[in-house]
Amino acid sequence: MPEGKEKAEYGSSLLTNLSKDLKTKYGRGFSKSNIYLCRLFYSKYPKFQTVSGKLSWSHYAELLTISDDLARSFYEKQSIKENWSFREMKRQIDSALFQRLALSKDKKGVLALAEKGHELIVVKDAIKDPYVFEFLELPKDKVLKERGLEKKLVDNLQKFLLELGKGFSFVARQFKITVDNEHNFVDLVFYHRILKCFVIIDLKTRKVKHQDIGQMNPYLNYFKEEENTEGDNEPIGIIIAADKHEFTVKYATGGLANKIFVSKYQLYLPDQKALENKVKEIIDSR
């Protein structure tokens, strides 16, 4: 028998016997898979001082299923920083949050992301592209109008806030803006307590057009003049659309004083393997 196979079989029988002995002595909770997780936990966290008391065993058991050390470190740090429940953390792992954030960074940025978690240093750090709305549980071929998407997001507000990220607080839906006796309605308004500014969100269930970006600009100017109070920073606008063309966005936002961002959304979980490969390319680059 080859040496490697012999060691594997010995290790498997050892876990089986240990599981039986512990269950006989202490009762339930010592299945072979749990014993394996305990062993894996010790190999990844040999120093008990590095383990956070803010996370449950369920958190760590899920973290141990992540083979990539950088991704595991990020989810651990971010769970502690944002006080994620086990379900919230699992959702962020399934939606490939680490990889989505990492793709906008260089090698140094990816390593810092894994070591410290997601930090809001500039306004752009609060923006994701794409946003993942798999929690709406809509079929990919579902034809959805903007008002319908808005209603679905508000109906799932807690999950939507989790996807938006730390710091977002819901303010209003269909916020009315009246200028010269003409009424316009902003889809969604949030306030970002870390950035200390209003965040105006406009939803588009089609490809974004330059007119959409032009429409956002007066909304931001209105909030700057009429809604901001002392201590507030300038508002930011996010157009979340089904699709976008990079040059359209570049030319439409170029030269604007206001901060306007355009992101895509998708109704399904991303291809984790493809994203992992892209992040690996960044890490392997010099």
Image: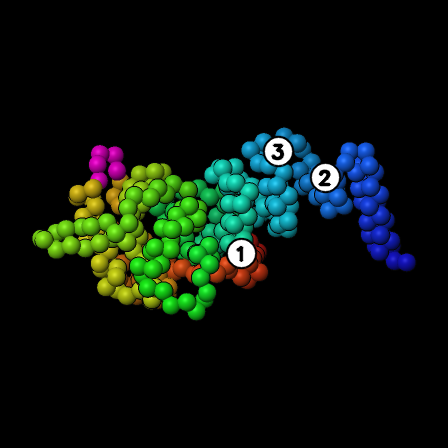
Query: What segment carries the magenta color?
Result: 228-232
2 or 1: mark nearer the eye = 2
Name the foreground residue: 256 vs 30: 30
- Residue 251 vs 196, above or below: the answer is below
| Residue 230 image point, x, y percent | 22, 34
Neighbourhood count class around disc 3 (C-alpha, 10 Å): few under 14, some 14–19, many 20 upward: few
Taking the spot 38% from the left edge, 68% from the top edge, the residue there is 143
| Alpha carbons under labels 2 and 1: distance apart | 37 Å
Q: Amino acid at mark 1?
A: Val
What residue is shown with label 3? 50
Is any part of residue 215 visible from this angle? yes
| Alpha carbons under labels 3 and 1: distance apart | 26 Å
Image-based side of 100 in relation to 218, left or right: right
What residue is shown with label 2? 29
SS at badge 1: helix
Instruction: Looking at the image, tell me whether mark 3 or mark 1 is earlier in sequence order.
Output: 3
| Alpha carbons under labels 3 and 2: distance apart | 24 Å
